[in-house]
Amino acid sequence: MKVGDMVRIRDIGFSTKYWPESIGQMGMIVANAKRLYIPAVKVMVLGEIAEFDLEEIEVVDGNR
């Protein structure tokens, strides 16, 4: 995953518990981040920038 990739928020993990509206939404990676020792990314979704663990998102293929 790299900056500029389109992603979909999955229904697993810590972040989606506190922001359930983001589940299933599309977003774009805007920066890399790190939560303690867990790799994460900052994603622009629903007009806001939020931080998600890599396991909480999936890359969407733009060719579909």
Image: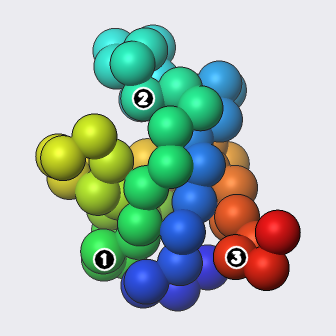
CB atoms at circles 1 and 3 under 8 Å apart? no
Whole-percent x and y of residue 10?
65, 35
Name the mark nearer the viewer: 1 or 2: 2
Q: Mark 3 falls on what kind of element?
A: loop
- Asked whether 46 or 15 is in front, the reply is 46
User: Residue at left 42%, top 29%?
Assistant: 22
Question: What amino acid type should be assigned to the residue bearing mark 3?
Answer: Gly
Find disc 3 in the rendering and name its residue. 62
Please tell me which residue lies in front, 11 or 13: 11
Residue at horizontal 59%, vertical 32%?
A: 24
Residue 40 drawn above or below residue 1: above
Q: How crowded is mark 2: few (under 14 residues within 10 Å), some or many (20 or more)?
A: some
- Mark 3 or mark 1, which is nearer the start of the sequence? 1
Quadrant in which residue 44 is drawn: bottom left
**To which quarter of the image does residue 63 belong?**
bottom right
| Foreground: disc 1 or disc 3 | 3
Check disc 1 and report the residue beneath it.
31
Give the Cα distance between marks 2 and 3: 20 Å
What amino acid type is highlighted by mark number 1?
Ala
Sequence-wise, the earlier of marks 2 and 3 is 2
Horizontal side of residue 9 vs 64, given as left or right: left
Q: Earlier in the sequence, mark 1 or mark 2?
A: 2
Between the C-alphas of marks 1 and 3, the distance is: 19 Å
Quarter of the image where the C terminus is located: bottom right
Residue 58, position as x, y percentages in the image: 69, 55
